[in-house]
Amino acid sequence: MTSKRILVVDDEEAIREVVAACLQRLGGWEVLTATSGQEALQQASTEKPDAIVLDVMMPEMDGFAFLQQLRSNPETQPIPVVLLTANSYLPNPQLLPKLGVVLTISKPFLPIVLVKQIAQAMAW
């Protein structure tokens, strides 16, 4: 079985590195990283990851603006997204599945729980 590839998008380097390490070491998945929504859109289009772990609060392009652009491109439209958020309140949570969000995880998180929740949500 081929390893799944996950794109981790977070403007905070420490969070990005922790999430990437968890997914690689505990999940055994290949990890790509992006520091911004724009960089992530380019990688999603060229690399075609199996899933995206996305920070909601980012400068310039927040997670929701990223999702709208991701879904407007037929090549990236089907990629499932896991939201990472430090804010427990998300506006219009009922819209998340329509935007391709399969799971929302609150920061801080336990590494093993992060990996298990993603594996379960993706049916991996």
Image (cartoon, helix red, strand yellow):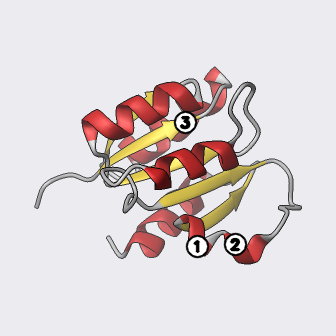
Q: Distance between the Cα atoms at labels 2 and 3?
A: 21 Å
- Quadrant where the N terminus is found in the figure: bottom left
Q: Distance between the Cα atoms at labels 1 and 3?
A: 20 Å
Closer to us: 53 or 48: 48
Q: Residue at x 53, y 45 (%)?
A: 69
Does the residue at mark 1 contact the one at mark 2 (Cβ under 8 Å)?
yes
- Which numbered disc flags the more N-terminal residue, 1 or 3? 3
- Which numbered disc flags the more N-terminal residue, 2 or 3? 3
Pointer 1 residue: 98
Please tell me in which quadrant of the rendered image residue 33 appears: top left
Residues packed near mark 1 inside 10 Å, few (<14), some (14 to 19) or many (20 plus): few
Q: Position of residue 51 (x, y in %)?
A: 40, 54
Q: Residue at x 30, y 50 (%)?
A: 75
Q: Residue at x 83, y 61 (%)?
A: 90
Please tell me in which quadrant of the rendered image residue 79 appears: bottom left
Q: Position of residue 5 (x, y in %)?
A: 30, 47
Pointer 3 residue: 9
- What label does residue 95 carry, if any? 2
Does the residue at mark 1 contact the one at mark 3 (Cβ under 8 Å)?
no
Closer to us: 117 or 70: 70
Q: Position of residue 40 (x, y in %)?
A: 47, 33
What kind of residue is marked 1? Lys
Is residue 84 toward the left or the right of residue 89 in the image?
A: left
Q: Position of residue 123 (x, y in %)?
A: 36, 76
